[in-house]
């Protein structure tokens, strides 16, 4: 099981959009937002993130091996939606990202009311029926 603070960090990256607290720059592949600095530092030390800049209240980071993370996160959400168990994580390029996506799907599914207009990489839009891709 992934801790809530760790899941919040990585989910915030997957939810990055123009209307969210975290933004993503397609050209530089940088995420900018207000993150838990202790969690960011831990994952910098582990090599999952790179620190670009720390400003007043905002931090800019890069997600290393982003393509693998994105595909594994989406696979985790998809398998959770299909009712599969987490053993499929072993078959992904990034088992950690798979687990984050899997657990996040279950957290969202627990909510009594689905969030209208919710945007997250690998999740189906209730409005369009399309899977959001970052």
Image: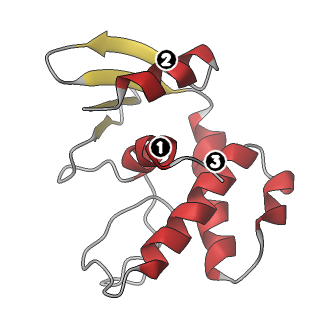
Image quarter of the N terminus:
bottom right
Looking at the image, the residue that sits furthest to the left is: 56
Residue 58 on image: x %, y %:
21, 24
Q: Is residue 35 visible?
A: yes
Element class at badge 1: helix
Q: Which residue is mark 3?
A: 97
Q: Is residue 121 above or below residue 9?
A: below
Cα–Cα gap, marks 2 and 3: 17 Å
Q: CA distance from mark 1 to mark 3?
A: 8 Å
Q: Earlier in the sequence, mark 2 or mark 3?
A: 2
Give the alpha-carbon distance from disc 2 to disc 1, as whole Å: 13 Å
Where residue 35 sits: x, y (%)?
32, 32
Q: Position of residue 27 (x, y in %)?
A: 35, 29
For disc 1, the marked residue is 10
**Contact (Cβ within 8 Å) of mark 2 with mark 1:** no
Which numbered disc, 1 or 3, marks the residue that appears first in the sequence? 1
Mark 1 neighbour density, 10 Å: few (under 14) some (14–19) many (20 or more): many
**Residue 69: x and y, percent?**
61, 43
Q: Is residue 130 visible?
A: no
Q: Which mark is residue 66?
A: none
Q: Secondary structure at mark 2?
A: strand
Considering depth in this image, is 89 or 36 the residue closer to the camera?
36
Disc 2 versus disc 1: nearer the observer: 1
Helix, strand or loop at disc 3?
Answer: helix
Residue at the spot 44% in from the left edge and 43% down from the top edge: 5
Q: Residues within 10 Å of mark 2 (few under 14, many from 20)?
A: some
> What is the residue that sits farthest to the bottom in this orientation?
112
| Mark 1 in CB contact with mark 3 (< 8 angstroms) | yes
The label number, if any, that marks residue 50 in the structure image = 2
């Amino acid at each position: 099981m992934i801790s809530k603070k760790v899941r919040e960090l990585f989910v915030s990256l997957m939810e990055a959009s123009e209307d969210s607290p975290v933004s993503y720059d397609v050209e530089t592949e940088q995420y900018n937002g207000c993150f838990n600095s202790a969690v960011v530092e831990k994952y910098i030390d582990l090599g999952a993130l790179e620190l670009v800049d720390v400003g007043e209240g905002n931090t800019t980071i890069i997600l290393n091996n982003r393509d693998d993370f994105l595909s594994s996160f989406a696979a985790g959400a998809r398998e959770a939606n299909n009712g599969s168990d987490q053993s499929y994580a072993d078959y992904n390029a990034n088992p950690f990202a798979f687990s984050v996506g899997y657990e996040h799907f279950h957290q969202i599914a627990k909510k009594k009311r689905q969030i209208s207009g919710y945007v997250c990489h690998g999740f189906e839009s209730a409005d369009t029926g399309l899977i959001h891709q970052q």
